[in-house]
Amino acid sequence: MLICPLFLRANDYDVNGDGNVTAADVTALYDYLLNNDLTHAATCDVTGDGTVTSADVTAVYDVLLNGIPATPVPERLVGGDISMLTKYEQGGAIYKDRNGSTIASILPYFKQQGWNAMRVRLFVNPENASDEHKKEGVVQDLPYVKALGKRIKDAGYALVLDLHYSDTWADPGKQTVPAAWPSNDVEALKDSVYNYTKRVLQQMIAAGARPDFIQLGNEITGGMLWPTGQIYPTGGAPAGGSWENFAAYQQRASQAVREVSPSTKIILHVEMHNLNQPSGFFGNCESYGIDYDVMGLSYYSAYHGDFANLNTVLSRMEVASTKPIMIMECGYGYAWALPGTNYNLANIYPYSNEGQKNFTIDMIAALKQHSRVKGLFWWWPEANEFNIPWQNQITSSWWNGSLFNNNTGQAQDALYELKQFIE
């Protein structure tokens, strides 16, 4: 079995090694698949999934039709989920560096600090969300995400698209079927997942915002599209749900990704409320043959415990699957405890600029003990209500884990530490 890097470089599409990507590379793949011609065996695994199949042919065709991605994806990623950036900019937020100087444009500034990837969430129809959820940040419809995604790609970042498969927040406590989709018809829901995923990718690509990575659901530890797709992560399911249904929804979603954008890597994203949940989830995904590329994990010490807990979970995930791991969400408060805090580490990391910075430094050191952790994303780093009149506030409450101070617009020191993850 061929072993290739997770993240493709542009020359990975040049199967025959002549310096160009042409129909000759497709021919080389067919010679391998049909005639067992091993001349170019070392470069035939274009998708990097460990096997050579028709998906590799599709990947080369995709490059021939749409061009080689302009920005090669780095081996290690660091950045944040900046899904609200457009709203803060429209509201007139002023961003400053840690010395108090105004930042002219935030996307280039993040790049200057060593960030190389950004994540954006997408809801099916956020107009159906409650007013409460809209004021929490449920505003990202497809036109919004296409525009922000293109800005991210044009700025030279890798793009992670986070599909919620819901009109509102999808997380371990809720995975609500979109209002326009059938709620209990499994076969119809399979088609809805496939058609929606396909349509989103086609429109993102047409807009110049091809995702480099895509999450097929957000924090799906307990499944997706409840009740039929609800599961227990370590096995079994509550009444009305099943692992068979969940796996079928995932397979239809991944089928759409492989057909429309074979170069886009698939992430399955979970969180942890006990140390066995993530490993049990991915172990079951392997058993059910779910097609994906990356294990994604949320880590908030306030809810998930200290770095010893994180180390235990990562070690168990490494046993459950051989795939790479990314921390899709993380954060730490700079002024007060996060709502619902279960693990208060303020005696080690005070709720302050310095405490947030030191938490970040130590978290990165812990992650670097695991060579298969390839990505780190801060949740909502762009939150900044500075210079926005209170009556026009973007969200109903401030995110205290931002990397900008909502009162002053000034960058937190932790922002400048994240690049250590890839250095």
Image (spheres, rainbow, N blue to C red):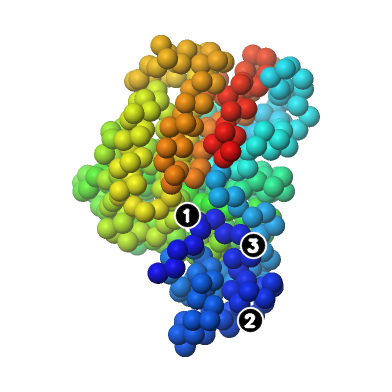
Nearer to us in this view, 277 or 173: 277
395 to 318, vertically: above or below: above
- In the image, farthest residue toward the bottom: 35
User: What kind of residue is marked 2?
Assistant: Ala
For image coordinates 49% across by 32% down, the residue present is 364
Q: Residue at label 1?
A: 266
User: What kind of residue is marked 3?
Assistant: Ala
Q: Residue at label 3?
A: 10
Q: Residue at label 2?
A: 24
411 to 179, vertically: above or below: above
Q: Quadrant of residue 19?
A: bottom right
Left or right position of 413 against 181: right
Residue 142 in the image: state x and y as whole percent.
60, 48
Residue 123 in the image: state x and y as whole percent.
52, 44
Q: How far apart are marks 3 and 2 (CA)?
A: 16 Å
Left or right position of 168 against 61: left
Local crowd size for mark 3, using a 10 Å CA cut-off: few (<14), some (14–19), many (≥20): some
